[in-house]
Image: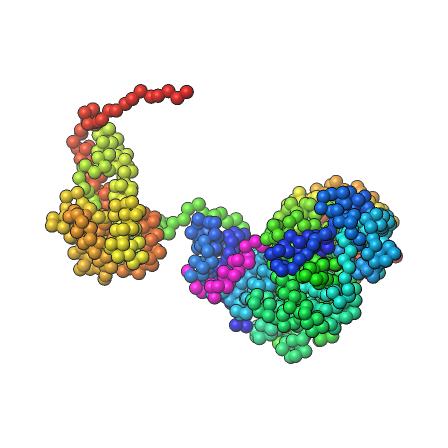
Amino acid sequence: MAQRAIREYDGKALFAKHWNKYFDGFHYDFKSVLVTSGDELREKAKEHGFEWLNQEPLVAKPDMLFGKRGKNDLVLFRVNKPGDVTLEDAAKWIDEKSSHDVTLLSGQTGRLTHFIVEPFTPHTQEQEYYISATTVGEDDVLYLSAEGGMEVEENWDKVNEVHIPIDLSDSDIEKVIKANIPADIPADKQEEFGAFAFAFYKFYRDLNFAYLEINPIVMLDNNKMAILDLVARLDDTAGFLMADKWGDIEFPTPFGMEEKSPEEKAIAEADAKSGASLKLTILNPMGRIWTMVAGGGASVVYADTIADLAGVKDLANYGEYSGGPTTAETEFYADTIFDLMTRHKDPRGKILIIGGAIANFTDVAKTFTGIINSFKKYADKLKENKTKIYVRRGGPNYEKGLKDIEEAAKQLGLYIEVYGPETHVTDIVRIAIEADKEGEK
Amino acid sequence: MNKLFTKDTQAIFWNNNKTAIQRMLDYDYVIQRETPSVAAIVAPTSNNKFEKFFYGPDEVMIPVYKSTPEAAEKHKNADVLLNFGSFRTAYDVTMQALDLKQFRVIMITAEGIPERMARVMNHRARTEGVTIIGPATVGAIAPGAFKVANIGGTIDNIVKSKLHRPGSCGLVTRSGGLFNELSNIISLNADGISEGVAIGGDRYVGSVFIDHLLRMEKNPDVKYMILLGEVGGTEEYKVIDAIKEGKITKPVIAWCIGTIAKHFSSGVQFGHAGASANAERETAAAKNAAMREAGIYVPNSFNDLPATINEVYTKLKKDGVIGEIEEPVVPTIPKNRRPKNFICTISDDRGEEATYAGFPISSVATPDTGKSIGDVISLLWFKKQYPKWATEFIETVMKTVADHGPAVSGAHNAKVTARAGKSVVESLVTGLLTIGPRFGGAIDGAAKYFKYADDNKLTPAEFLNYMKKQGIPIPGIGHRIKSLRNPDKRVEGLKKFAAEFFPATPLLDYALEVEQLTTSKKDNLILNVDGTIGILMVDMWRALGYTEEEINEFIESGTLNAFFIAGRTIGFIGHILDEKRLAMPMYRHPWDDILYDVQEAEEIK
């Protein structure tokens, strides 16, 4: 649960859906399509309502949550001269761009899969403006500038920041926005821009955006607005309030992030069904040090300590199981980790950290029963991988939990060391790594 | 106040989270609090009036209310609200609690309250000087004084981590899970904590590190502070500024977890919602370096934190800042406690002699004690010692309602049953079973409706109009034969008694005004004996100091009816014994007294 980015296409669709309510007096012609291939675009052009794809010059660009597409040369708006892109040009360009991996200037690498295609909007540089809203500290901040476009960051000194405290009334918000319209916006556009900015803020606030930026917003004649580029993040904790307003909105994985593995997806699904918390991120499937840590805070300090003492490349995964998972949930989680960690042998062997702080209410013996069940299934594989297991845990019923897991592991012939609350929470990492270095000598 | 909680702090617990509340009471027992730390529970959907919990080996009852305003009204000294509402309801619960202006601290456990709502809620609390702990927190603790819900974990762990008595450290963390761990580390490497708060993991939390550290700075029991921060946000810099400005002078030990995050560009969410760095200075490493530079004790890694704590503590102890702590005796909580199936609050037969509400039976039974049946009723029904005029009134009522001849339905039933050869108890029960809304119910009804009219300041005319609209004849008004000119002597007697001995009879006075109006319409619409009893009972309770609400409860629960049941039992038994003596045969009702109108049943196809 956090702030999550949505596609430019979905952001524009939200504007279109709520336009009349918020932007009375302004006009917005929502002409955008989201496609994954040239053929899909060609098919779309045959549909009723999308005739413009054949009739107007187009712009195509990837819609995958990353910015600076212009600087990355990933915006198709010209073949020979601006505004001459045909449907076929766009379709071919999409197929070409999605046929190989792309590395952005920021270093992220990945395959382009989603493209937004829109009509080319002829306009002048003077018609481009910048507007965005987010939260800084306790206030909302609205950023306004007469200079929109690719160079807004270079021209940040021309951006007016309007701070809007959370308890300000609508009439005061309107006043403060209108008093802060950038002076370099032409006199005849001042009022129009002020009205738009106030509406934009209310739209941002009421729809629970965490971040919303249009750059540039183009003000054409007759109060016609063109949203040329849009970046948006929603506060997904407000999802339960926004079911109607957002509709069925997608939160895609950011570009360059590997798609979730089947194992990560399975844990995420189990998490969604459970009242407990189950999280798994695979950092390096070839890593030697695997963790199965209870608790959100503890999982972070174990990761910190492993990176500090062993180096980050050995750390295979990050995750947690907490909030009183059942024995079966814990067993499933352990199965997943043990399966992953025994896929690639390493001559130096593996280290398994079963860690956790002193639980508030999770029954340690109960969750450890799940781990023991999993030991029984994976004992041979864990032994083949020369796995050394280090356990540290406290909380309700921990004495029994520690005793059970130690006895079970020893019966199965697994190497295990077991520690309780008298040992510092992350000290088993030090113990494990020192023993490991000792072994290498 | 420079302390979050004291040993007198009481909380209202929103949501009937039995495990968490039990843990608070276990803690109360271990630290030997005089009052339970939970004054009341708010459970909107519960119909219970109280919930039972263990206090050591015994059980105690905590009152349950349907709303926060109701609970707050009844427990004025409870200035902490533990809001255990879900992420859907926690906001509304908090805003309503703020309206009441009674709570000094509001703790919110829900994770994932929409950010904008959290900001509105936090801002309002801050403006009004209310400390919000959370959202997304396990709470706070003042060892030896007050513990929020599950913080500290099990009672065994609490004692092991020395959270049952004050130490000298002020602890602030973001994570709730690591709070326990830190408490443990501090107990192993120092002398425990004086006050501790987990501020919560959501992006927008009500109170932040600096709020708590500034309070701890002013709290003379806190000798040094420990801060456990996280990657993301800039709250730690406020602490650095406070140290630079001299607002914090006590030693501070700090560490930000999440140094791992620097190894991963984006996408991996390490820890809480609030835990992601938007800029270099929000990274754990940057914050740790900045804090170290400001003179805060910052270890080289989390794993070295225990050593740093030990170093600071040892130095403060050597310097005489921290003294020795005398370890208190810890009462043990029995391992196997069984909840009691029954509760009794009126009498006790376990001692030398059985008691009625604390009074041995012999002290109220014989004539020389000067006590009457009215006294016994006041003890066993109301758990109070009513004054003489009230016990005598009760007795007068009992005597007045004892019997009203063989023709009324209850007496008739009892006689018919007795004649069928059944026992005293069987016959009595058939008689009693007729008591209800139609037979004897006018006492209840009169009390209820006259009180309603009086409470709502209805004039007699408005009251008559109201009852007409309800379509109910006014209970307690009307007699078969008696009228103003031929008054009911029983009523006269009751009125005379009340006039002489009751401190005041406002409801009776009102009822007599109503009677003037009704008798002007029809001569026999007088205030009858049932009405007089019901109305005078209300006047009695008012004079005894009961609240209107308590009196309404008496009426609702059928207490007035009980006087009729108890009194009339005397009469029914008289009729049954009469039948036994007379040995009359089985009764059969004569045919000629029944209208037979039987038609052949139609067939339905």
Q: Quadrant of residue A180 in the image?
A: bottom right
Q: Quadrant of residue A154 in the image?
A: bottom right
Q: Nearer the viewer, residue B300 or B511?
A: B511
Q: Name the side, left or right, on which B536 lies relative to A350.
A: left
Position above or below: A144 against B114: below
Question: Looking at the picture, how far across and down is residue B88, in whole percent?
Answer: 57, 53
| Residue B580 seen in this snapshot | yes
Position above or below: B126 against B351: below
Residue found farthest to the bottom: B246
Q: Nearer the viewer, residue B25 or A195?
A: A195
Residue found farthest to the front: A222
| Residue A313 seen in this snapshot | no
- Residue depicted at 44% across the width and 48% down the height: B47
Q: Nearer the viewer, residue B441 or A160?
A: A160
Question: Looking at the picture, how far across and down is residue B418, in whole percent?
Answer: 23, 32
Total number of numbered discs in the rendering: 0
Q: How is the image coloured?
A: rainbow
Let me know if residue A187 is in the magenta part: no
- Tell me which segment is drawn in magenta: B74-101
Residue found farthest to the left: B485
Question: Looking at the picture, how far across and down is residue B196, in whole percent?
Answer: 60, 65
- Residue depicted at 20% across the width and 50% down the height: B518
Q: Name the side, left or right, on which A225 lies relative to A176.
A: right
- Residue depicted at 69% across the width and 45% down the height: A269
Q: Quadrant of the C terminus of chain B?
A: top left
Question: Looking at the picture, how far across and down is residue A80, in whole percent?
Answer: 88, 56
Q: Quadrant of residue A128 in the image?
A: bottom right
Q: Nearer the viewer, residue B596 or B284?
A: B596
Let me know if residue B93 is in the magenta part: yes
